[in-house]
Amino acid sequence: MTFTATTLSLYPEMFPGPLGVSLAGRALAEGKWACNPVQIRDFATDKHRSVDDTPAGGGAGMVMRADVLARAVDHALAANPDVPVLAMTPRGTPLTQARVRQLAAGPGVTILCGRFEGIDERLFEGRPIEPVSIGDYILSGGEMGALVLLDACIRLLPGVMGAPDSGDDESFETGLLEYPHYTRPAEWEGRTIPEVLRSGDHARILAWRKASAETDTRLRRPDLWERHEGARVKSPSGAQRQKKER
C-alpha cells in the first residue's frame, strides 16, 4: 500500500517542495509515498476562478468560500474515500506525535491548505474535516503546515528511515523530550562527554538517559511534564491518586 498525500492548495507547485529531497525525496522516488497536489481554483465556477469573498459581518481580509472548497474536498473524497481529510488552520487541534503515528499507519491523508483570514466555518459542519494546527503562531497559508505534517508522517513509513526502530526513542514518543546526545571527539573546547556514556555500563546509561529526559522535560516543557506525570498516576479505571484522597 502506497501512502498517498493529496494537498488541496492555491499553490500546488509548493508540493513536494522540500519533501522532494533527503529521506522523503528518496522515499517518493522509490514509490513509498505518492504526492498529489490539487489546485483549488479548478473547482471555482466563475470566469475569474474566485475562491474567496469578504467576511460576513465585516472586517479585514477575505474568507475562503465553503462551496468552492466543498467541491475540492468532494473530489478528493471520491478518489480516496478511506483517507482522512485534514485542514491546516490555527483554530485546529494541536498536532501530536500520537496523531502523526495514526496517520502514518493509514493509507494516506488529504490536506486542505487554508489561506487569507480563514475558511467559511460551514465547510467544517458540512464535510468530515479535521482542523489541525502545528503551533500557536500564524503562517501565510496552510502549505507550510502541510509540509511539516507530511514530513512527520513520511519518515515513519516502513523503509524510509534506515533502522526500523529509529523513531521509537525520540522526543514526544514517550511523552517526554529526548535525552541529550553526544559523539566524538570525547573532549571539545574543554567540555567532555559525560562519564556514564563512556562507561560501557548499559544499565547505567539507560538510567542516565531516562533521568536526563525527565529533567529536561520538567525544566523546558512543564506542560509536557504535567501531562506525563498525570498519565503515570492515572489508574486503568481513570481514578487518580485515590490513596492520597482517603
Image: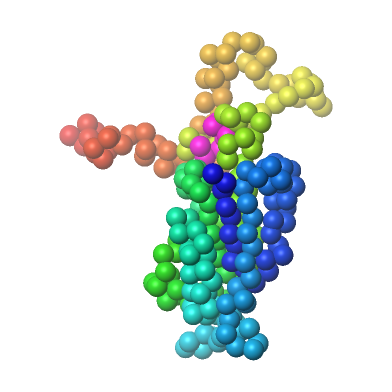
Q: Position of residue 53 (x, y in %)?
A: 56, 85
Residue 136's place in the image compared with 141, above or below, is above
- Magenta stretch contains residue 172: yes
Q: Position of residue 98 (x, y in %)?
A: 47, 44
- Magenta stretch contains residue 213: no
Q: Is residue 3 visible?
A: yes
Given the current orientation, which residue lies at the most extreme right position?
189
Number of numbered discs visible in the structure rendering: 0
Residue 90's place in the image compared with 30, above or below, is below
What residue is shown at x 68% (from left), y 69% (from top)?
Answer: 11
What residue is shown at x 51% (from left), y 49% (from top)?
Answer: 107
Residue 80's place in the image compared with 123, above or below, is above
Given the current orientation, which residue lies at the most extreme left position?
246
Rendered-image quadrant of the C terminus: top left
Left or right of residue 231: residue 76: right
Q: Where does the magenta region start and end?
A: 167-173
What residue is shown at x 64% (from left), y 11% (from top)?
Answer: 199
Q: Position of residue 125 (x, y in %)?
A: 39, 72
Left or right of residue 143: residue 207: left
Q: Position of residue 30 (x, y in %)?
A: 69, 42
Left or right of residue 77: residue 6: right
Rendered-image quadrant of the N terminus: top right
What residue is shown at x 54% (from left), y 19% (from top)?
Answer: 206
Instruction: Kindly report the secondary structure that dominates the magenta region of the rendered protein.
Output: loop
Q: How is the image coloured?
A: rainbow
Could you say which is closer to the camera, residue 18 or residue 54? 18
Q: Give the quarter of the image for residue 140.
A: bottom right
Q: Is residue 142 visible?
A: no
